[in-house]
Image: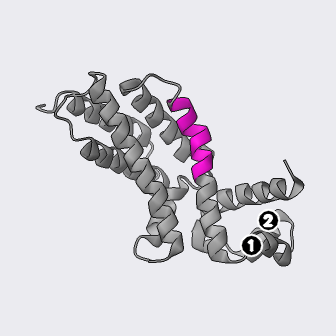
């Protein structure tokens, strides 16, 4: 890997960890330069603006999500085994991978009503995640794990809602039984997907 690429990757990893604690808006060129031990001009050589840095941090988060969560999930058989592995990976991603929790959920709270390129990049990544969840649910129907009448998009909606609730209960409310409640809610979602009349 060329030195410039290695330096940029290192900076993005530090920026990603920092943004999970202070938010994308709290991530400034000056603050990151101090943490990375670089000059502002050195950072500007890699990222021409704060907005570009924010977008690249979101892209780096998506790359890390693929490595940490999706690679393991896609090694499992299609259907429910893959959905379960993905769910386990996503909980670990929000609790263990970053000091401040899931960067996508944190960024969504900052940019949900703010049009612009950063919001566009964020919605693109979250949209892909929702489609991935819906596709996994469709595979579960194909494999006979879920009921044929299942609405995959509704499953994805409720799956995402669980992740949002988990982040808030864990990070904001500091609820000690968050993981137990989240897993119980997930099992209820899976049971209803298999038998929607329950």
Q: Secondary structure at mark 1?
A: helix
Report x, y in % for residue 30. 76, 76
Residue under label 1? 31
Quadrant where the C terminus lies?
top left
Report x, y in % for residue 13. 71, 55
Tell me which residue sits at (20%, 36%) in the image: 150
C-beta proximity under 8 Å, tags 1 and 2 = yes
Tell me which residue sits at (57%, 51%) in the image: 62
Does the magenta segment cover residue 67? yes
Tell me which residue sits at (27%, 28%) in the image: 141
Report x, y in % for residue 46. 78, 68
Secondary structure mostly seen in magenta is: helix
Report how far apart the C-alphas of labels 1 and 2 lie in the structure.
Answer: 6 Å
Residue 197 vertical position relative to residue 115 in the rendered view, above or below: above
- Tell me the magenta residue range: 62-73
Residue 55 vertical position relative to residue 161 in the rendered view, above or below: below
Q: Is residue 133 left or right of residue 116?
A: left
Q: Which mark is residue 35?
A: 2
């Amino acid at each position: 890997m060329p030195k410039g690429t290695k330096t940029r990757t290192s900076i993005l990893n530090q920026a990603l960890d920092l943004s999970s604690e202070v938010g994308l808006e709290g991530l400034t060129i000056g603050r990151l330069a101090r943490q990375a031990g670089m000059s502002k001009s050195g950072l500007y050589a890699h990222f021409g603006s704060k907005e570009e840095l924010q977008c690249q941090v979101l892209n780096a988060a998506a790359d890390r999500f693929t490595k940490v969560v999706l690679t393991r999930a896609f090694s499992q058989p299609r259907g429910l085994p893959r959905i379960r592995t993905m769910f386990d990976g996503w909980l670990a991603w929000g609790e263990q991978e970053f000091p401040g929790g899931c960067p996508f959920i944190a960024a969504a709270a900052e940019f949900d009503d703010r049009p612009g390129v950063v919001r566009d990049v964020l919605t693109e990544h979250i949209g892909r995640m929702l489609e991935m969840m819906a596709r996994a649910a469709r595979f579960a129907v194909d494999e006979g794990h879920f009921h044929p009448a299942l609405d995959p998009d509704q499953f994805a909606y409720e799956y995402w809602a669980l992740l949002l609730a988990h982040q808030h209960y864990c990070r904001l409310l500091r609820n000690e039984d968050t993981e137990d409640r989240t897993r119980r809610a997930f099992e209820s979602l899976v049971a209803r997907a298999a038998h929607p009349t329950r």
